[in-house]
Amino acid sequence: MMDVSVVGALRFWYRNLLVFRKVFAFTVPENFLEPVLYLLALGFGLGAYLREVQGLPYVAFVATGLAASAAMFGATFECTYNAYVQFTYNRSYDAVVTTPLSAEDVALGEVLWGATRSVLFGTAYLTVVALFGAVRSPWAVALPGVFFVGGVVFSAVALSFTAVTPSIDLFPYYFALWITPMFMFSGIFFPLEGLPGWVQTVAWFTPLVHMVRATRALALGDPSAALGEALWLVGAAALLLPAPLLLLRRRLVQ
Amino acid sequence: MWRVLRIFRHVAVVVARDLVKRFGAVTAVDGVSFTVRPGECYGFLGPNGAGKTTLMRMICCTARPTAGVLQVFGLDVRRQARDIKRRLGVVHQGVTLDEALTVRENLLVYARYFGIQGQQARRRTEELLVFAELEARAEERVPKLSGGMQRRLMIARALLADPELLVLDEPTTGLDPQARHAVWDRLRHLRRRGVTQIITTHYMEEAEQLCDRVAVVDRGRIVVEGAPRELVQRYVGREVVEVQAADGVARIVAERIGALAEGCEVVGDRVLLHTRDGEELVHRVRSLGLPLESVSLRRATLEDVFLRLTGRRLRE
C-alpha cells in the first residue's frame, strides 16, 4: 500500500534546504539562543552553588544535556509549525503531490529534513559548549549520528501529530504535554536517579532521555554506555517512521 | 470495427466509466463517464459544489475513486499514479506556489520533482519565464506578484516537464478581465501546439472561448456533453430575449409571453425567451403592453443551456 521513494523524498528534502538557507537567521533564536540562555542561567547561576553532579562539573552536565534538547527542538519546530503552515496556509504540499512525488515521499522528505535540522542545531550547540569544556572525548564525532537518529524519532512523532491535528491552536498542547515534560524530566538539569522509580520507568519510554544519555556518554568518552541508548533510538525510529507517512497520505490524498 | 475501437482506446487521453467518488455520506461524483481525446480542450462547466474539483483531483491521482474506471494515458489512477503524474501538468485551484521561494526558484525546485536538474532545468526555467512574461520578476518572492502573475507562474510551472495533458482547475477565478485574457491567450497558444487540456470553470464565457467540448456538470453528474456552440443551438437556439418584469409579476408575464418563444425560463424578476429570431420577438413582446421594465436581446450562451437543463444558474 505504501508508495515511497527515497529519491523523491530527497528532492523534497532539497526544497527545504533551499528555504532554510534563506530563513536561517530567523531560526537561531528558538533553536540556538534559548539553549544558550539556559546554559548561562543554570550552568553558571545554579552551577555556582552546585559544583558537581555525578562527578561532573555542573556546567558540563547541563551543557551536554542541552545539546540533546537543541537537537530535539530543531526537529520538532520543523515538523510541527513549519510543516503545518506549508500544507494548510501555503498549500505547497498540495502542489507537490500532483508531481511524480507521492504523499509518502513528502512525509519522508519532511522527516529527513527535521532530522537534518536536529543534526545542524545539536552540532552547532555542541561546538559552542565545547568552549566551556563540556566535550572531553573524540567520541563526540559520533554525535551527529545520534542527533540524526533521534531527529527521525522526534520528527516522526511531530509530523504524525501535525498530520492529524485539526487546528494550529492544538500545538501548544503538543508542547505542554509532550515536549516540555521531556525537556524537564530527561536528566538534562538533574539526574533522574533521584526521582521515584515510576518516574524513571515512564521516562525510559520517552526518546529524549536516551538522547541525553547518549550525548553525555559520547561527549565524555564512554561509548559502551552510549551504545544501548543509541540502539533504543534506532529501534524507535524504525518503529515510528511509517506513522507520519501513512497519516500524511490520508491528509493529502482523499 | 475492432480495429477502430482499438485505435480509439489507444488514443484517448482520459477515459472515465461510471466513475463515483463518495466522502462518507456525501456523493461528490455520481456515475460519470467521459472521454478526452488527444489535442482537444475539454471543459467541465458547473456551479460550485457540482463535483468538478473532485473530478480533477481523481485525474491528478490525489483523490481515489470509490467505484468505476478512470484511466489517464491508458494507465489506472489507482495503481499507476506516479507514471501518470510524470506526464501531467496541473494548475490547481487557488495559489499553491511556494511562497518561501522566488519566482525562478519555484520553477527550479518544481523541475527537480520531475527529475529535471542542472543545465536542462535552468534552460527550461528561462524559457518559461519568457512564456509567462515574468523575466523581470524572476528574483522576487511569490507574495509580491499580482494575482494574474501568480496564475501565469502556475501555468509556467505546470509546463516544466512538457506535459501531454494539462489539467486546470478554475484557472481564472478571481482574476480581473485583463489578467483573464492574458491567461486565455496562453492556453490557446498551448492548444495550438497540441497540448491536451482539461479545464473546470463556472464562467460560461471561458468555456466558450477555450473548450472544444464541454461537459455540463450538476450535482455530481454530467447533464449534457458537446461542443459549446452546438449545445447552445440544440438546447436554446440562437438568441435570448431577456425581459425584466415589474416586481413580483415575472411568472404571470411568462405565462403570457412564453408561448411566443421556443423556450422560456424564469429567473427572479426576469423572463428569458429562447428564439431563432430575436428582433421579431422583441417587437412582439413590446407590443403586448405588459408591465415590463426592459426588454433586451442577446446571444444565447452556455449559461442558458445550464439554466434550461438544471433550472438553476451557474453562479448564484
Image (cartoon, rainbow, N blue to C red):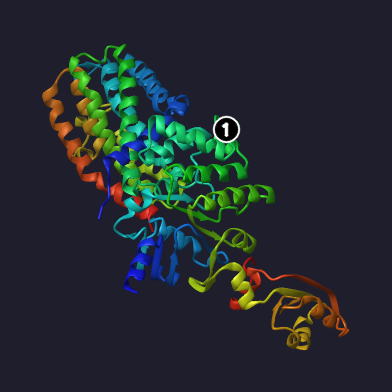
At 31% from the left and 16% from the top, the residue drawn is A127
**Left or right of B270: which side holds B156?**
left
Q: Is residue A17 above or below residue A252?
A: above
Residue nearest the observer in this picture, A24 or A130: A24
Q: Say which quarter of the image contains residue B55.
A: bottom left
Residue nearest the observer in this picture, A123 or A108: A108
At 57% from the left and 38% from the top, the residue drawn is B143
Provide residue A56's location: percent of width, then percent of height: 22, 16
Residue nearest the observer in this picture, B131 or A144: B131
Q: Read off the residue under disc 1.
A: B135
Number of marks: 1
**Quadrant where the C terminus of chain A lies?**
bottom left
Provide residue A4's location: percent of width, then percent of height: 27, 46
At 48% from the left and 39% from the top, the residue drawn is B98
**Quadrant where the N terminus of chain A lies?**
bottom left
**Which chain's residue wears label 1?**
B
Q: Is residue A222 above or below residue B82?
A: above
Provide residue B59's location: percent of width, then percent of height: 41, 59
- Mark 1 residue type: Glu
- Mark 1 falls on what kind of element? helix
Q: Is residue B248 above or below residue B199?
A: below
